[in-house]
């Protein structure tokens, strides 16, 4: 799996979808990034749509409902980890507290990037958000 995989979804008015992904499968478990080719294609697509006078609605990230639900789940997990840390410190369980701090740092690093890249947003052809491109 790629830590930074980008996906563009083009949806027709009738509901049909075309997914564009910034990686390709090399083997069953290995994905190869195509970041520069994907970036070039997405920028060219936006430029052509703008030149054609498109009225496409440009959005990025997750849907607002899914994003809100994921933020609520992360808030619950954060509160649970904080409570466990307080408990570990209260009973002087130093190795447990150190483990929780390390796990929290890893969690913030991995999930933080996902949260930033997938924030719901609307944009224009002239102002493509940097978080949406590799």
Image: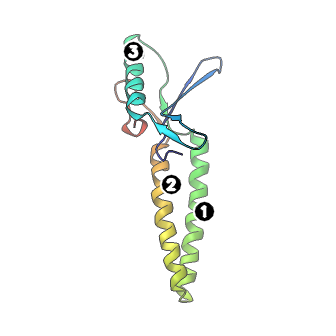
Q: Is residue 11 left or right of residue 98?
A: right
Ranked by sequence position, the earlier of labels 2 and 3 is: 3
Q: CA distance from mark 1 to mark 3?
A: 44 Å
> Considering the numbered disc 2 on the image, is that residue within a helix, a strand or a loop?
helix
Q: Residue furthest top?
A: 52
Q: Are marks 1 and 2 in contact (CB under 8 Å)?
A: no
Q: Is residue 59 left or right of residue 17?
A: left
User: Where, by quadrant of the figure, is residue 76 drawn?
Assistant: bottom right
Q: CA distance from mark 1 to mark 2?
A: 14 Å
Coordinates of residue 122 in the picture (x, y in percent) = 46, 32
Q: Residue furthest left?
A: 126
> Can you identify the residue that label 2 sits on?
111
Q: Nearer the viewer, mark 1 or mark 3?
A: 3
> Can you identify the residue that label 1 sits on?
76
Ranked by sequence position, the earlier of labels 1 and 3 is: 3
Coordinates of residue 91 in the picture (x, y in percent) = 57, 89
The crowd level at tag 2 (other Cα within 10 Å; few <14, some 14-19, many 20+) is few
Q: Work out whether residue 1 or residue 134 is closer to the camera in this orientation and state it.
A: 1
Coordinates of residue 72 in the picture (x, y in percent) = 59, 55
> Can you identify the residue that label 3 sits on?
48
- Is 77 rendered above or below residue 45? below
Residue occupying image coordinates x 58% and y 48%: 68
> Considering the numbered disc 1 on the image, is that residue within a helix, a strand or a loop?
helix
Q: Nearer the viewer, mark 1 or mark 2?
A: 2
Q: Work out whether residue 101 or residue 53 is closer to the camera in this orientation and state it.
A: 101
Q: Residue furthest front?
A: 27
Q: CA distance from mark 2 to mark 3?
A: 34 Å
Coordinates of residue 84 in the picture (x, y in percent) = 58, 76
Residue occupying image coordinates x 61% and y 49%: 69
> Considering the numbered disc 3 on the image, is that residue within a helix, a strand or a loop?
helix
Ranked by sequence position, the earlier of labels 1 and 2 is: 1
């Amino acid at each position: 799996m790629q830590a930074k995989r980008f996906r563009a979804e083009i949806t027709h008015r009738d509901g049909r979808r075309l997914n564009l992904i910034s990686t390709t499968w090399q083997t069953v478990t290995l994905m190869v990034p195509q970041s520069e080719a994907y970036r070039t294609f997405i920028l060219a697509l936006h430029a052509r749509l703008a030149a054609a006078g498109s009225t496409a609605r440009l959005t990025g990230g997750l849907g607002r409902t899914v994003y809100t639900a994921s933020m609520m789940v992360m808030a619950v997990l954060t509160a649970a980890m904080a409570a466990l840390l307080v408990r570990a410190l209260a009973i002087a369980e130093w190795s447990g507290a150190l483990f929780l701090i390390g796990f929290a740092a890893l969690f913030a690093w991995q999930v933080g990037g996902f949260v930033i890249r997938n924030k719901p947003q609307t944009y224009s052809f002239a102002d493509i958000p940097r978080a949406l491109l590799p």
